[in-house]
Amino acid sequence: MLAARRRARYGYLLALHVLLLCASGRTPTEIAAVLFCSRSSVYRIVRADRAGTLGWTADEDGTLAAPVRPTMLMPWRRRSLEAVLKAPPRAYGWCRTRWSCATLAAQLAAKHSRTVSAETLRRWLHELDWVWKRAKLVAKDPDPQRVERLARMRFHCEHLEGREVMVFADELDIHLRPKVGYAWIPKGARAFVMTPGQHTKPYVAGALNRATGKRGHCLGPRKTKALFRDLLTLLDHTYPAPGVRRVYVVVDNYSIHKAQAVEHWLADHPRLHLLWVPTYGPRANPSERVFGDVHDKCTRNHKRQRLPNLIKDVERYVQENGPWPYKLSQIYYEPTITAAVETMGAEAASEVAA
């Protein structure tokens, strides 16, 4: 409690208490006991007052003004700092794209004529619950059918019948050249990952059943329409016609998914129906998280020098691990998506009633 009090109190308030108690005839020992401070603080304040270095100022009428302590984040300083942080530095004439503590200190000094250090600004930012954090790149979402596509996938996912299945499909590149990632190593040392003599990469096409978490996959030397047709054939055999009436396959907008050969194959297999995720919408496909898990466990900093061995590692991991019971992303539960899903449900109910 004493430590918290010492951090929170204002220095000029302590000096004011000390001087008032001295004027009332209290001894330094009594003052230190009452104010929970040391006797040396009492002596230091009295000496500073006699020397005129406490920083007190008086008006012509004798009104005493306390010294200003710029290191304290007063409410008006908080409002000023928050107002500055709302705009980028270029709005104030700085040739910068992001604020630094030194730039904030210079801006506040120019605006309010109060000089504070960069470290004081750093402490103030922490008091405002601001942190120095790396930004995240996001892609522009220009798809005009974003709401409709997300709502349709969520609607089918929530209203699957007993003989219907929904899977999320995607393709994965397996690089013989290792993907470099973080690892625990001794301090001062460096870990080395040998690169192959010739870089090659096969492709894996996989489909995740969100309800069961099970995943099916097939391999191919190139990411072409033939690889996607092989995956569709695998799904057709995995979910045979007597037991499954409809298979919804959620895919992205890659060109191989829209090829004419794929359309002809789907025309011959009407049980399989494609659903499209929005453009630049990787979070809409939980299969991306499965492939990210495969990268972390199999291809990150791997030591394989031959491609067949690396492929066996990936296949073994996919076969022996799982299921991956991922939930849908929060983007499926935005208010606009929820409203669209409710509209689809009302239209479906009216068609059934008719």
Image (spheres, rainbow, N blue to C red):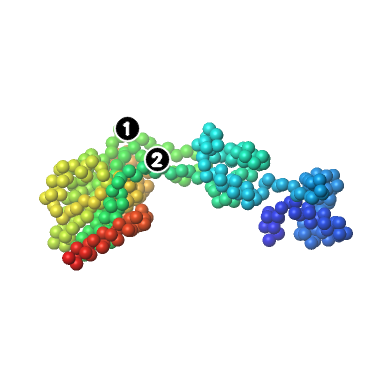
Mark 1 belongs to which amino acid? Gly
Q: Earlier in the sequence, mark 1 or mark 2?
A: 2
Q: Quadrant of residue 181?
A: top left
What residue is shown at x 26% (from left), y 63% (from top)? Answer: 346
Residue indicated by mark 2 = 180
User: Which quadrant of the rendered structure holds the C terminus?
Assistant: bottom left
What residue is shown at x 20% (from left), y 56% (from top)? Answer: 247
Q: Is residue 207 left or right of residue 69?
A: left
348 is higher (above) or lower (below) than 229: below
What residue is shown at x 68% (from left), y 54% (from top)? Answer: 7
Residue 69 x/y as whole percent: 70, 47
Q: Is residue 117 visible?
A: no
Mark 2 belongs to which amino acid? Val
Residue 236 x/y as whole percent: 17, 54
Q: Is residue 104 left or right of residue 14?
A: left
Residue 123 x/y as whole percent: 61, 47
**Circle on res. 197:** 1
Q: Nearer the viewer, residue 68 or 251?
A: 68
Q: Is residue 236 left or right of residue 115?
A: left
What residue is shown at x 26% (from left), y 44% (from top)? Answer: 253
**Circle on res. 318:** none
